[in-house]
Image: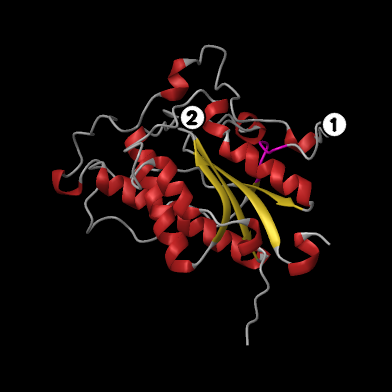
Amino acid sequence: MSLFQESGKRAWHVTCATHNSRYSQRMFDNYVKLGTPVWLSEKEELIVTETIAEIAAKDKLNILAYNICGDHMHILLVCEKAELHKIIQKIKSMSARACNIAMGRTTREHAPLTGEDSPSDGTTREHAPLTGEDSPSDSTTREHAPLSEKDTAAEHTTREHTPLSGKRSSSRGKTQAHLWTQKFGKKEIFLEKQLYNTIEYIRNNRVKHGLSVDVGNSRGASSLVGIIEKICCTPNHTFRAEYKN
């Protein structure tokens, strides 16, 4: 009997992209022009990941896999469908707030507790395949769709050093900058094989994109790898039987 049949729980592969890093058909049809895409520095990646680790521990989230890759992050989350939007909204808003404070874009007293992110969701175009033969239309990757034919390194421009506007108050920092897109991608996992394929896909995502896995203190708990280990649970723990009474 599969993990899903035993527990009745639902697993979601969630993809969150950074602000201005994706261009959709809807945006094209409405002549929307993107600003500078957000590319997270390694320091910001650590801040986001540490914030998610704190949320996961406090809220006892069941996260099977997690990774962050400059302009997007992956989370394999097990929860009830009704909880999904609220959990992801909290992760996005609190990680954006932590980044803006740490990077000097805003001061703690001015950073909103909730914020930039709409609770609405989207559909992701980037997920691990079900099998080697499966290639459903909704799994086509949009992860590296260029903003224009001329865009190459510009897609990786960091927002860490975005210049200040002269009209901003110095006491507020730079601004409460947008970190994530309003919508997020979600794909429900139905099969056990699909689940383990997705875990492997997310774990190897930094390697896939040519990013270093040696971020932070490579041998300590404060490294990216060390923090991710604290975030993630095993499948047996995640799909354990639970009772409300």
Number of numbered labels in the structure image:
2
If the image is split into quadrants, where does the N terminus sit? Answer: bottom right
Give the structural element (helix, strand or loop) at label 2.
loop
Q: Which residues are magenta?
A: 123-128
- At label 2, the amino acid type is Leu
At horizontal 75% and vertical 36% (from top left) the residue drawn is 129
Taking the magenta stretch, the answer to whether it contains residue 37 is: no
Which color mode does the image show?
secondary structure
* Prevailing SS of the magenta stretch: loop
If the image is split into quadrants, where does the C terminus sit? Answer: bottom right
Taking the magenta stretch, the answer to whether it contains residue 126 is: yes
At horizontal 78% and vertical 53% (from top left) the residue drawn is 190
Which residue position holds label 1? 133
Give the structural element (helix, strand or loop) at label 1.
loop
Location of residue 175 in the rendering, given as x and y in whole percent from the top left corner: 28, 44
Q: Is residue 105 or residue 4 the one in the foreground?
A: 4
Distance of mark 1 from mark 2, alpha carbons? 36 Å
At horizontal 23% and vertical 34% (from top left) the residue drawn is 165
Q: Residues within 10 Å of mark 1 (few under 14, many from 20)?
A: few
Q: Residue furthest bottom?
A: 245
Q: Is residue 146 or residue 74 the one in the foreground?
A: 74
Task: Tell me, yes or no, if residue 115 can be seen here.
Answer: no
Q: Residue furthest top?
A: 150
- At label 1, the amino acid type is Glu
Location of residue 91 in the rendering, given as x and y in whole percent from the top left corner: 46, 55
Q: Is residue 114 left or right of residue 7?
A: left
Location of residue 82 in the rendering, given as x and y in whole percent from the top left corner: 64, 67
User: In the image, which disc is placed on residue 173?
Assistant: none
Which residue position holds label 2? 34
Marked residue nearer the N-terminal end (1 or 2): 2
Task: Tell me, yes or no, if residue 28 can be seen here.
Answer: yes
Location of residue 49 in the rendering, given as x and y in whole percent from the top left corner: 41, 47
